[in-house]
Image (cartoon, rainbow, N blue to C red):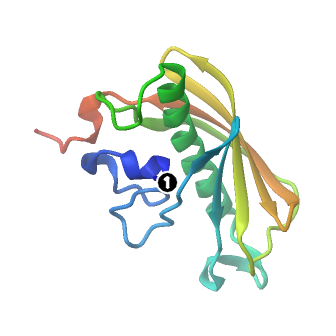
Amino acid sequence: MKAFQDYYPENVAQCYGCGSNNSHGHQIKTHWDGEETVTFFTPEPYQMSVPGFAYGGLIASLIDCHGTATAAAAMYREQVRAMDSLPPFRFVTGSLHVDFLKPTPIGGALEIRGRVKEIKGRKVIVEISVLASAVLTARGEVIAVQMPESFGSKPGE
């Protein structure tokens, strides 16, 4: 099954967190799991803050990109459209809020879950949970805003 990110148009598939065309990025892959979305990510030792624990910026970026991917998939679902239909839905972050509840350990896969809280016009609000070994370590909220089709173009094009 293709991940949400596999449907991103080439001109916007460079995102550090979720772009399939960014070989240095996280390259997360998000799928539906019932009414929630899920992705898994295993932090590397170089992504630590203090020995044994993930850097908070990493956690924030995972919440961010999982949220915008969830927003796109939710908009397709709401409009009863296939994810490869045109025009494409692509979202950027309008607001990102993160609560760090416990240190997030390095050494295993993190489970990142999203739940759509609201869809209103070009805006989707997504609640995200980060779990390490089934323990909630962070939660966040992403306000994702649908970007115009021209946004992924290079300046001057």
- Note whether 38 is above or below 114 in the view shown: below
- Number of callouts in the render? 1
Q: Position of residue 27 (x, y in %)?
A: 47, 63
Is 148 placed left or right of 18 in the picture? left
Q: Residue at x 51, y 35 (%)?
A: 73
Q: Residue at x 48, y 19 (%)?
A: 79
Q: Residues within 10 Å of mark 1 (few under 14, many from 20)?
A: few
Is 25 placed left or right of 120 in the picture? left
Quadrant position of residue 42: bottom right
Query: For the residue marked with disc 1, what is the amino acid?
Result: Met
Q: Nearer the viewer, residue 67 or 59?
A: 67
Q: Residue furthest left?
A: 157
Label 1, secondary structure: give it: loop
In the picture of the structure, the residue carrying the numbered disc 1 is: 1
- Note whether 70 is above or below 38 in the view shown: above
- Note whether 76 is above or below 3 in the view shown: above
Q: Residue at x 11, y 39 (%)?
A: 156
Q: Residue furthest front?
A: 1
Is 102 placed left or right of 146 in the picture? right
Q: Position of residue 17 (x, y in %)?
A: 49, 58
Asked whether residue 24 appears in the rendered view, the answer is: yes
Q: Position of residue 32 (x, y in %)?
A: 62, 43
Q: Position of residue 87 (x, y in %)?
A: 29, 27
Quadrant position of residue 149: top left
Q: Residue at x 10, y 38 (%)?
A: 157
Asked whether residue 99 appears in the rendered view, the answer is: no
- Note whether 12 is above or below 25 in the view shown: above
